[in-house]
Image: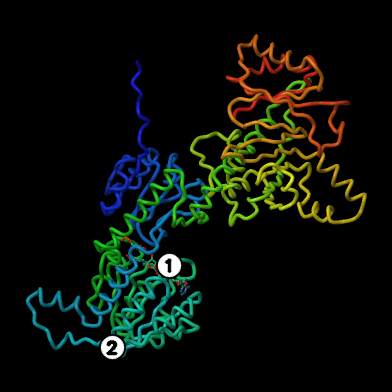
C-alpha cells in the first residue's frame, strides 16, 4: 500500500535577525530557514523556493529579487519603514507586503531622546575622552533640555511619542507636518508651524520623524542648516537621506551647527571615507548603527506582529497591516469568500466557453470580449469593498489563458494585470428585482458587445427615446451573459449566454447548443458512452426569459445542454457531435 507522502511545508526565509518570539508561531506549519549574511546573489539564488520572506531594514527586496521569487506570496517587514522593499514590483507580482506599523515606535522615540541627551551632554566625546585616559571636565560642558525648543519634523507615531517624552523634560514643542492631526498635536502640547523654515529657525533641537519619500529626501540641506541657530543640534532616527550628510559635516566643522545625533545613514553600513563615515567620526556627533528599534521589547513586538500576518496570508486569509492591499475586515472576508469562488468560476467559465467552443464550421473562437459589466445584486450591494470579487473575476478570466509560471493573481495585482491585458471591468451594484429571485444575492457578468462607455448605456436606459431603447435592447441582446448565485455556501450558475440553466460550476463540463427537440440527449449520451466518457449530471437550459426569440443564427427553439462528465472530452469527440442531430456548437470547460 502506498504510504501517503505529506505535502511539503511552505517555506519561509529570514535573512536577518528576527526575534524568536514570532518565529515560534511558524515552526509547526512552515519550514523556517534563518540564513543571515547572504549576498544579494545568494539571496536571489534561493528565493524561488520560498512562499514568505521576513526582513528588517538591511535586506534590499529589489524588483530583480521579486521577479526570481516565483512562489513568494508575502514580504513581511518586521518594522515600520518599507523603503528597502520595491513595493510597486511586489504589487505587480501579486506579492502582499506587510509591516509592523506600531511594534517599535516607543523604542525609536526613546532612542531619539537618548541621542538628544547624549548630544546635549557630549556623552560620545566624553566617553571616548575618559576611555583614552583623559579627564576633561572643562571642555565637555553641555546644555539642558529643559526650556529648550524641540522642533519635530513629522508628527506621526514616533514624532508624537518623542513629543510626549520631551514634554516631561519641560521642553517647548513645535512641529512641521502638513498632514498632522491638530487635535493630537494640541493634546501633546505641540504647536504646529505652517513651514519647515519656522521650525528650523526656532529649534534648539531638530528631530526628524518622517518616512523617506520624495518630499522628504534631502529636506535638510546646506540652505536649511544655514537658517538654524549655531547652537542647534540635529537628530535623525528616521532615515538616512533626509539630511545632506556633506552639508551637515561642513556645518559642524564651521561651527554653524553645534552637534548631531544620528542613527540612520544614506548607506548602511556606511562606506569607508564616505560623508556618512566622516560624520560618524566627528567629535560633535553621537552615532549609532540603526539601533532605533533594537530593543528586546520592540523586536518581540514586531516579530510576533509580522509572523501572525504571515500565518494569516499563507492560510488564505488577509493580514491586518498590508502595505499594498486593501484592508478587509475578517468577518466581511468570510461573507465574501463563497462569492469570491463564484465570481472566479464565472470568469473562468467565460474565458473557456467563449474561446474554445467548436461550431459546425470548425473551431470558431467567439469574440473574447474585454469589456465587462459585473453587477452585484441583493446583500452584495452593502459591501464596504468588492476588491476580492474584482480580483476573483480577473483571476478567473486570465488563469485559463495565462502561463501559470508564478503569476499570482490576487487583490494586490488584479487591477494592474487587467489593465495590462486591456480588460475593462465596470462594477455595478443593483438593488432592483432581487425580491422575485429565490436567493439573496446574484452576480451578473455581462461581456459587452461594444466598448461603449457604461454610462452611455445608463444614459440611454434613462432616456425616453424609443429608438435609443431599441438600440440598447439590441446591444444587450448581443451581450454575452453569465449569472450566478450562492446557496448554502455553494456557487451556482443560473444563466449562460442566452440560456437559463442551473448547474454547479465544478469539474469538466460539455456544453452543447442545439435544437430543442427530442433525441438530442440520447445522441450525445451514446456518443460520449462510445468514447468512454461517463455523464455525472445533465441540465437542459431553455432560452432565458430576457432573451428575444430567434436572436441567434437559427429559427425556432434552441436549448443549451450542460453535461458534467467524469473526464476531459477530446476535441475529436466534440467535433463528432457538431452538425449531427441538431447539435449546433459545443465547448468543453474545466472549472
Ligand atoms: N531608526 C529606526 O530604527 C526606526 C526608524 N523609523 C522610521 O521613523 C520614521 C517615522 O516612523 P513613524 O512615526 O512610524 O511614521 P508615521 O507614518 O507614523 O509618521 C510619519 C509622519 O511624517 C509626516 N510627513 C510625511 N511627509 C512629510 C513631509 N514632507 N514633511 C513633514 N512631515 C511629513 C506624516 O504626515 C506623518 O505624520 C519612518 O521613516 C520609520 O521608518 C521607525 C522605527 C524605527
Ligand atoms: O522600523 C523601522 O522603520 C526601522 O528602521 C527599524 O529597522 P530595523 O528593523 O531595526 O532594521
Which mark, residue 146?
Answer: 2
Label 2 crowding class (10 Å Cα cut-off): few <14, some 14-19, many 20+?
A: some
**Disc 1 or 2, which lies upstream in sequence?**
2
In the rendered image, the vertical position of residue 494 relative to residue 101, given as above or below: above
Looking at the rendering, which quadrant does residue 107 occupy?
bottom left
> How far, Cα to Cα, is label 1 from label 2?
28 Å
Label 1 crowding class (10 Å Cα cut-off): few <14, some 14-19, many 20+?
A: some
| Residue under the point 67% across and 39% down | 484
The residue to which callout 1 is attached is 211
Residue 135: x and y, percent? Answer: 8, 82
User: Which quadrant does ligand 1 occupy?
Assistant: bottom left
| Residue under the point 44% across and 83% down | 186
Task: Decide which of 300, 200 is in the foreground and name it.
Answer: 300
| Residue under the point 33% across and 70% down | 237
Residue 210: x and y, percent? Answer: 42, 70
Q: Secondary structure under badge 2?
A: loop
Asked if residue 310 lies left or right of residue 415, the reply is left
Labelled pair 1, 2 in contact (Cβ < 8 Å): no
Task: Decide which of 441, 341 is in the foreground and name it.
Answer: 441
Task: Decide which of 152, 471 is in the foreground and name it.
Answer: 471
Q: Which corner quadrant holds the C terminus? A: top right
Task: Decide which of 278, 142 is in the foreground and name it.
Answer: 142
Residue 217: x and y, percent? Answer: 44, 69
In the rendered image, the vertical position of residue 200 relative to residue 38, given as above or below: below
The response on whether ligand 1 sits within 8 Å of label 2 is no
Residue 278: x and y, percent? Answer: 27, 70
Mark 1 vs mark 2: give the one in front: 2
The response on whether ligand 1 sits within 8 Å of label 1 is yes
Q: Residue furthest top?
A: 530
Amino acid at each position: 500500500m502506498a504510504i501517503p507522502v505529506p505535502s511539503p511545508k511552505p517555506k519561509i526565509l529570514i535573512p536577518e535577525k528576527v526575534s524568536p518570539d514570532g518565529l515560534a508561531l511558524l515552526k509547526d506549519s512552515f519550514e523556517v530557514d534563518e540564513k543571515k549574511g547572504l549576498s544579494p546573489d545568494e539571496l536571489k539564488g534561493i528565493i524561488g523556493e520560498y512562499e514568505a520572506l521576513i526582513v528588517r531594514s538591511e535586506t534590499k527586496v529589489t524588483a530583480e529579487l521579486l521577479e526570481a521569487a516565483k512562489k513568494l506570496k508575502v514580504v513581511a517587514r518586521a518594522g515600520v519603514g518599507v523603503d528597502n522593499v520595491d513595493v510597486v514590483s511586489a504589487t505587480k507580482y501579486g506579492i502582499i507586503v506587510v509591516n509592523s506599523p506600531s511594534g517599535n515606535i516607543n523604542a525609536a522615540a526613546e532612542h531619539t531622546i537618548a541621542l538628544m541627551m547624549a548630544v546635549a551632554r557630549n556623552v560620545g566625546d566624553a566617553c571616548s575622552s575618559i576611555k583614552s585616559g583623559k579627564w576633561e571636565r572643562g571642555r565637555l560642558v553641555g546644555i539642558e533640555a529643559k526650556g529648550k525648543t524641540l522642533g519635530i519634523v513629522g508628527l506621526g507615531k514616533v514624532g508624537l511619542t518623542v513629543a510626549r517624552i520631551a514634554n516631561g523634560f519641560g521642553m517647548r514643542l513645535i512641529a512641521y507636518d502638513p498632514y498632522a492631526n491638530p487635535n493630537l498635536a494640541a493634546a501633546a502640547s505641540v504647536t504646529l508651524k505652517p513651514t519647515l523654515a519656522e521650525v528650523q529657525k526656532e529649534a534648539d533641537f531638530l528631530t526628524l520623524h518622517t518616512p523617506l519619500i520624495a518630499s522628504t529626501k534631502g529636506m535638510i540641506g546646506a540652505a536649511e542648516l544655514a537658517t538654524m541657530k549655531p547652537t542647534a543640534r540635529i537628530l535623525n532616527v528616521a532615515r538616512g537621506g533626509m539630511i545632506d550628510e556633506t552639508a551637515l559635516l561642513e556645518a559642524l566643522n564651521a561651527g554653524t551647527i553645534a552637534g548631531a545625533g544620528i542613527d540612520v545613514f544614506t548607506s548602511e553600513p556606511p562606506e569607508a571615507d564616505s560623508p556618512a563615515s566622516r560624520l560618524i567620526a566627528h567629535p560633535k556627533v553621537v552615532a549609532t548603527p540603526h539601533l532605533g528599534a533594537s530593543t528586546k521589547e520592540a523586536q518581540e513586538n514586531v516579530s510576533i506582529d509580522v509572523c501572525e500576518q504571515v500565518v494569516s496570508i499563507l492560510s488564505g486569509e488577509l493580514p491586518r497591516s498590508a502595505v499594498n492591499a486593501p484592508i478587509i475586515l475578517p468577518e466581511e472576508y468570510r461573507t465574501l469568500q463563497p462569492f469570491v469562488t463564484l465570481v472566479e468560476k464565472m470568469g473562468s467559465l467565460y474565458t473557456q466557453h467563449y474561446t474554445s467552443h467548436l461550431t459546425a464550421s470548425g473551431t470558431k473562437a467567439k469574440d473574447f470580449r474585454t469589456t465587462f459589466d459585473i453587477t452585484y445584486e441583493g446583500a452584495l450591494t452593502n459591501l464596504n469593498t468588492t476588491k476580492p470579487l474584482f480580483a476573483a473575476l480577473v483571476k478567473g478570466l486570465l488563469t485559463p489563458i495565462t502561463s501559470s509560471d508564478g503569476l499570482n493573481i490576487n487583490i494586490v495585482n488584479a487591477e494592474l494585470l487587467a489593465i495590462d491585458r486591456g480588460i475593462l471591468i465596470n462594477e455595478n451594484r443593483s438593488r432592483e428585482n432581487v425580491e422575485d429571485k429565490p436567493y439573496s444575492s446574484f452576480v451578473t457578468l455581462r461581456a459587452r458587445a461594444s466598448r461603449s462607455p457604461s454610462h452611455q448605456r445608463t444614459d440611454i436606459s434613462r432616456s425616453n427615446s424609443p429608438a435609443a431603447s431599441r438600440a440598447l435592447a439590441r446591444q444587450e441582446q448581443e451581450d454575452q451573459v453569465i449569472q450566478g448565485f450562492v446557496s448554502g455556501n455553494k456557487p451556482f450558475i443560473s444563466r449562460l449566454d442566452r440560456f437559463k440553466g442551473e448547474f454547479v460550476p465544478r469539474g469538466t463540463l460539455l456544453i452543447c447548443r442545439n435544437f430543442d427537440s427530442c433525441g438530442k440527449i440520447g445522441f450525445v449520451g451514446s456518443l460520449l458512452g462510445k468514447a468512454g466518457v461517463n455523464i455525472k449530471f445533465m441540465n437542459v437550459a431553455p432560452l432565458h426569459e430576457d432573451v428575444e426569440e430567434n436572436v441567434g443564427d437559427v429559427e425556432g427553439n434552441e436549448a443549451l445542454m450542460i453535461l458534467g462528465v467524469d473526464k476531459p472530452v477530446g476535441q475529436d469527440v466534440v467535433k463528432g457531435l457538431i452538425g449531427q442531430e441538431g447539435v449546433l456548437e459545443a465547448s468543453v470547460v474545466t472549472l
